[in-house]
Image (cartoon, rainbow, N blue to C red):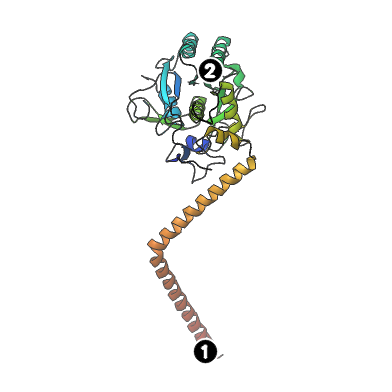
Amino acid sequence: MKFADHAIERGAPWGLARISHRSRLTFSTFNKYEYAEGAGEGVDAYVIDTGTYIKHGDVDADANGHGTHCSGTIAGKKYGVAKKAKIIAVKVLDSNGSGTMSDVIKGVDWATNSHVEKVKNMSLGGGKSRALDLAVNGAVSAGLHFAVAAGNDNDDACKYSPASAQQAITVGASTLSDSRAYFSNHGQCVDVFAPGLNVLSTWKGSRDAVNTISGTSMASPHVAGLMAYYLSLQPEADSDFATTMLSPQELKNDIIAASTREMLEDLPPNTPNYLIWNGGGLSNLSAIVKTVDRSYDEFISEENTSTMESFKEYFEEEIDFLSENIGDKVEEAINEAEAVSREIADAVSLSLHELCDEFGV
């Protein structure tokens, strides 16, 4: 099922490609991101981090790069999940990536008081902090949609904050081979997984700077981008199909429900096996949610059919190319081989006759 604004980005980072396909990536899909062209439009995404390099050509003052990388994954023109979302930086960490818990909480509170019904990403954290968890849960209760990193200690995410904030979406990191990244925290406080190992995105320093880095800090922006993506696909308020604005809990439920299930390996006990999915190009949130009611086997069957079709197209193109460009050479080689075979046969025949004459046969 496709819609008019179904778009394909070729040469996309593997993480974008992965969240737009149900089945494991193949050579024909590993850099192909399928998405709704208008995804993210009209949605603000606040990045509570080191800031954002606002002069970068892919995202519209970051001396660290971490915040710029997250921003690019959320809404970058090339590297972003929701390409038309608007990035707003909330700087709470310094150029070394460090900051105080009080400054982080102030950033959360500022976003809560000024900007309800928006998306927020927190690719940061530390040890368990009741104050930070309360701030994040309070922000979600006020209408903000929060994605937070699970942490990078290969430990129980419930020991960390804001990963243990129950109302946010806590994100673990997955790999290109569909396993849990070796560093990713895990456990029942993790809600979903998203690409987090060797993620390419924007970087500080110039308009075209990029960097490949790893962490649940890279996974969380995929979910923040998906939040903006889903929110933008709701019917317009004056539409006959309009519904009430999605609450954070409803959006969280939709993201979890639409995720690809039982795909990831190396998950410790009590860790949910959900890998996020953007709908594969569907441009209406209702259509994406409705697909959840269909059997999972049907999803995989469709995806495999699509993959087989792409294999068929690929090999047909290769065969045509070979036929047009080296067909004559192949025919020439065959003729030469046949000539050599005849020469060998004649030589063998002659040798046999000589042998027979020698023995008087």
**Foreground pick, 262 / 205:** 262
User: The residue under label 2 is which amino acid type?
Assistant: Gly
Q: Position of residue 359 (x, y in %)?
A: 55, 88
Q: Position of residue 91 (x, y in %)?
A: 42, 15
Left or right: residue 77 compared with residue 224: left
C-alpha gap between disc 2 and disc 1? 103 Å
**Foreground pick, 256 / 195:** 256
Asked if residue 215 can be seen in this view, the reply is no
- Disc 2 or 1, which lies upstream in sequence? 2
Q: Secondary structure at mark 1?
A: helix
| Total numbered labels placed on residues in the image | 2
User: The residue under label 1 is which amino acid type?
Assistant: Asp
Quadrant housing the N terminus: top right
Asked if residue 280 can be seen in this view, the reply is yes
Residue at horizontal 42%, vertical 73%? 335
Q: Please, which residue is most extreme toward the right here?
A: 269
Residue at horizontal 64%, vertical 43%? 297
Left or right: residue 88 compared with residue 277: left
Which residue carries the number 1 mark?
Answer: 357
Q: Which mark is residue 143?
A: 2
Residue at horizontal 51%, vertical 42%? 2
Q: Tell which tag, 2 or 1, sits nearer the viewer.
A: 2
Q: Position of residue 172 (x, y in %)?
A: 56, 27
Above-or-below relation of 308 to 127: below
Within 10 Å of disc 1 (Cα), the crowding (few <14, some 14-19, many 20+) is few
